[in-house]
Image: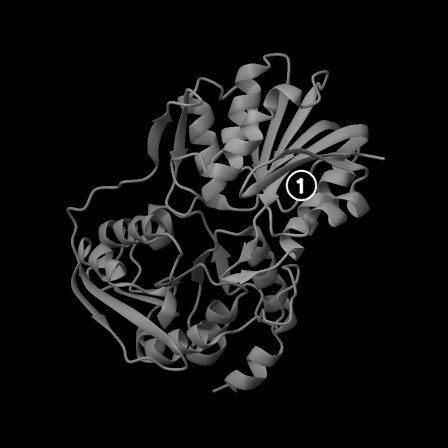
Amino acid sequence: MPDGAALFARLRREPDVEAPDLVAVDATDRLLLDEAAPLLAAAGPGEVVVVDDAHGAITLGAVALHGARDVRVHQDLLVGELALAANAGRTGLTGHHRSLPLDGDLVAGARVVLAKAPKALDALRELTELVAVHAADDVTLLVGGRVKHMSHAMNDVLRAGFADVSATLARQKSRLLVARGPRRDVRPSSPRCRRDDATGLTVCASGAAFAGPRVDDGTRALLRALPDMAPDAGTALDLGCGTGVLAAALASARPQLSVLATDQSAAAVVSARATAAANGLAGRIEVTRDDAAARVPAGSVDLVVCNPPFHLGTAVVTAAADRLFAAAARVLRPGGQLWTVYNNRLPHRAALRRLVGPTRVADAGRQFTVTVSTRR
């Protein structure tokens, strides 16, 4: 059997953000593979599914260390898919996995499902429902995460879809929840939609979408500035669109505006499309899954709105936001505007001046700052 240490040493995060405390393989990846070893060895081709494998360690470990074949994979983040593909090529394992959407086809007939614990309970609920309904009768779902980020509520979510739920002992501050005995009568609860009275918009969200079917405070701060945003703009981009609230607000307020919404999260794209449809704007907003607007032509946009992330997993870093600011600078026409919002404690203003152009504060509250940057 191949040496796991040698395999893992070849894995990289790229094209994902690099930072000193961010790794390509973590203790939870290793624990999932070790605990699932006998299940993986007994599984046939196409019977193993991996969900939210950050950079490919679980998928490639299952293949190289335990003989899994034709592994079906879903990763919410596009950079995860790209990292897995690159690491498969780097280790000579290209062709042993398939990337699929998060739906019934992903888990149909699966006997082993390995998943990294999501941050949102709704995301775990969505996965639980899919596996319970579509996987094999003898399926085992293993959900792994850092002990400090796991809760008893996760057990409750799993018990709604499985008769038998247990926890492993902790190892290197990681633990697994193990679910067996799928309940076939569970009903899907995603996407969820809710009307926001302040905006008049109906917001829809699939399980892993940030903020769920509500408007987060940062987005509300940007929405207050909407009337001042590049009034003569003909094209607008909601960069890192999440559930598509900003795109929907722009399209609703400005019928003449051509609106594009992009996000690297598959859940965000599903959610933004549902939000557009729920507000009668499906024909007005183009929603695409894209990493930092890589497929948007340079110099093609008059207005960019962005509520950037400030967490990568559990780490607070600025690199993710900086990538989006650089992307905005690339796609904006000279004189175009980037409107963004961020937590007051983050040092984004200097990066905006450096990456985009002259930047001024448009609004500042107790928690959030809204800025407008003009493309040089």
Give the x, y percent position of residue 90.
Answer: 65, 71
For badge 1, the amino acid type reads Ala
- The residue nearer to you, when weighing 366 against 271, is 366
337 vs 250, left or right, is right
Picture residue at 65% right of the left edge, 65% below the top: 18
Picture residue at 45% right of the left edge, 22% below the top: 199
Tell me, yes or no, if residue 277 can be seen here. yes
Residue at mark 1: 293
Residue 274, located in which quarter of the rendered image?
top left
- The residue nearer to you, when weighing 309 against 350, is 350
Tell me, yes or no, if residue 242 can be seen here. no
Location of the C terminus by quadrant is: top right
Residue 190 versus residue 314 in the image, above or below = above
Give the x, y percent position of residue 101.
Answer: 44, 47
Is label 1 in a helix, a strand or a loop? loop
Picture residue at 23% right of the left edge, 53% below the top: 132
107 vs 266, left or right, is left
